[in-house]
Amino acid sequence: MKKKGYGFIYEKDLPAVKYEDIDIEGLCADEFAVTGTYSSFARNHCATVCLTNLIKIMIRQKNENVLSVFEEKTEEKDIFSGIYAFTGNGPVIALYRKLAAYLRNMKLLVKKEKYKSVEEIKEAIKNQIPVALLLKGFSMTDWHWVICVGVRTGEDGKVYFRIIDNWNKTLKRFMPVNKKRPWISALSFEINKK
C-alpha cells in the first residue's frame, strides 16, 4: 500500500476487501480548486483552497443561503480571491474566523460544528455535510487542510475517509483513520443570512 504526504492513499492502493461507502452525493472532482492553480502568488494556501472548495460544495448542493450571495456559475478564482483577502498566506489554523470575516461582508453568518470522533464525522457525511480536517505533518508548522466527503468501512474493520486533498482534482484519495485520531481539528460550517 503506497502512502504519500500525510498518509493519503489512492483508491487503487486500498486493501481489496468488501466495503461500505457513505459519500456526499453529486460531487465532481474536476470542479474542485487545487493549490497549484494559485501558487504563483499564494503560499501555504491550503486553508483558502479548502474554504473555496467548501463554498463550491454548498453551491453544488444548492444551499439557499450560499446561493443568495454566489451564483451557481460563480468563478472559482473569484471565490478564492475573496477568501484569500482574509486568509492571506498560511499556515492558517483559524479557519472558522477567516470564513466568518469573509462572509460577514456579504451579510452572512457562520456557525461551526466541531467533531471529535470518526462516528461523529460519519454521521455528518450521512447528512451530506462536508467536514474540514486540519492535519498535522512532521513538524510543528507542517499542517494541511483537507475535506472529508466520504467514509469507507471495510469488512476487515478498517476505516478510511474519502478526502479532497486540495492538491489533486480527484475523489479517489483516502486517509486511514484506524489508529489514533489523525486530525487536530474537524469542523463543518452552517451558513445563514444575517
Image (spheres, grey):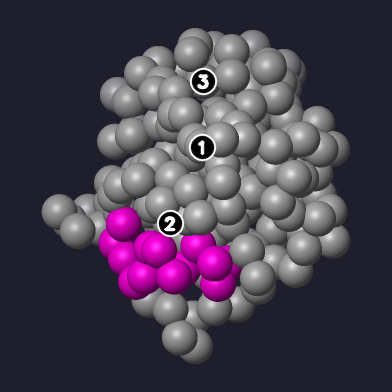
Answer whether labels 2 and 3 touch (C-beta < 8 Å).
Answer: no
User: What span is colored magenta in the figure?
Assistant: 80-92
Q: Is residue 77 left or right of residue 117?
A: right
Residue 53's tag is none
Query: How far separated are the C-alphas under marks 2 and 3?
Result: 19 Å
- Please tell me which residue lies in front, 113 or 115: 113
At label 1, which amino acid type do we have? Leu
Front residue of this view, candidates 168 and 156: 168
Name the element at disc 2. Answer: helix
Q: Amino acid at mark 3?
A: Ile
Identify the residue position indicated by label 2 in the image: 47
- Taking the view exactly as shown, the residue that stands out farthest to the bottom is 40
Residue 1 visible, this angle: no
Q: Is residue 78 magenta?
A: no
The image quarter in which residue 149 lies: top right
Rendered image: mark on residue 121:
3
> Quick one: label 2, few (<14), some, or many (20+) residues within 10 Å?
many
In the rendered structure, the answer to whether residue 90 lies left or right of residue 171 reads left
Q: Residue at x 65, y 70 (%)?
A: 78
Neighbourhood count class around disc 3 (C-alpha, 10 Å): few under 14, some 14–19, many 20 upward: many
**Could you tell me which quadrant the C terminus lies in?**
top right
Residue beneath the point at 30% across and 24% down: 180
| Residue 20 percent coordinates (x, y) | 72, 17
Q: Name the one closer to the observer, 84 or 32.
A: 84
Residue 55 to residue 191: above or below: below
CA–CA distance in space, label 1 to label 3: 23 Å
Percent x, y of residue 166 = 55, 58
Residue 57, compared with residue 63, is above or below; it is below
Q: Disc number at residue 109?
A: 1
